[in-house]
Image: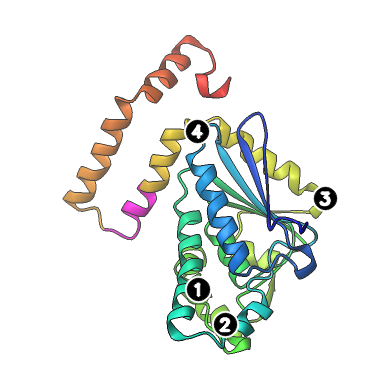
Amino acid sequence: MSEPNILVDIDARGVARLSLNRPAVRNAFDDRLIADLTEALARLESDAAVRVVVLTGSGESFSAGADLGWMRRMAGYSDAENLADAMALAQLLRRLNELAKPTVARVNGAAIAGGLGLVCCCDVAIAAAEAVFSISEVRLGLVPATISPYVVAAIGARAARRYFVTGERFSAAEAQRIGLVHELVPRAGIDAAVETVVAAILEGGGKAQARSKRLIAEVQDRPVSDGVMALTARAIAEARASDEAREGLAAFFDKRKPLWRR
């Protein structure tokens, strides 16, 4: 029996570790891995016991992007087949980007092309200092199309203009400088660094975190208009009246841990 494309492990705290599991091809993805990862994310999102999702790669790489054998096969697909295939990847990226649970990218090694796109879709990205990055599509005559909204949101248009057209590799230090990753650590220390972030996430209320994630998308790049003011006022008014906020405030004044931290 072949190894599964995706490994899922959920600990007693509700921390789900989701590992891309094709180490022989540096965790490159094909249509099967895309479908399996999309399904796994859907299951984790609907599981009330899951609080945090950590995305990583098996072996030495995070993900080398698209499997080139798969890409070569797709060149012979019809236009409709190619479009459907590309849409499956677009839907995966959107699901990860909009997941209601906090997400952490554990970038244990190279993150190339679509693999870099996965990193951009996570809320927090922690990378091994040894990791390398590239938006390499143009070097194959391709374009970084489905990942582009998330990459531009992460690194900005100016950095994207360079790395989209050069396809050059860049270091983890450069990835941090341009905003792609939040923190760099030696590979041997990556699990400890991820655990520190996960522990911080577990301090917060899950419903408040989900609403906070949506709030970013709702206010990003919008002027502070009457409509935005009304939206934000409604968000805090609804939060104040929620069971989670009542519990959080009661726990604070009672000098105890809220229920979600027990």
Q: Earlier in the sequence, mark 3 or mark 1?
A: 1
Tell me the quarter of the picture where residue 94 sits. bottom left
Q: What residue is pinned by disc 3?
A: 188
Q: What residue is pinned by disc 2?
A: 74
The amino acid beneath tag 1 is: Asp
Q: What residue is pinned by disc 1?
A: 85
The answer to whether residue 179 shows anywhere in this view is no
Real-space CA distance between mark 4 and mark 2, rounded to the nearest whole angstrom: 38 Å
Seen in the picture, residue 259 relative to 66 is either above or below; the reply is above
The amino acid beneath tag 3 is: Ala
Mark 4 and mark 1 in contact (Cβ < 8 Å)? no
Give the number of the mark in front: 3 or 4. Answer: 4
Residue 192 counted in the magenta span: no
Residue 219 counted in the magenta span: yes
Stretch in magenta: 215-222
The amino acid beneath tag 4 is: Ala
Apparent side of residue 124 relative to residue 3 in the rendered image (left or right) = left
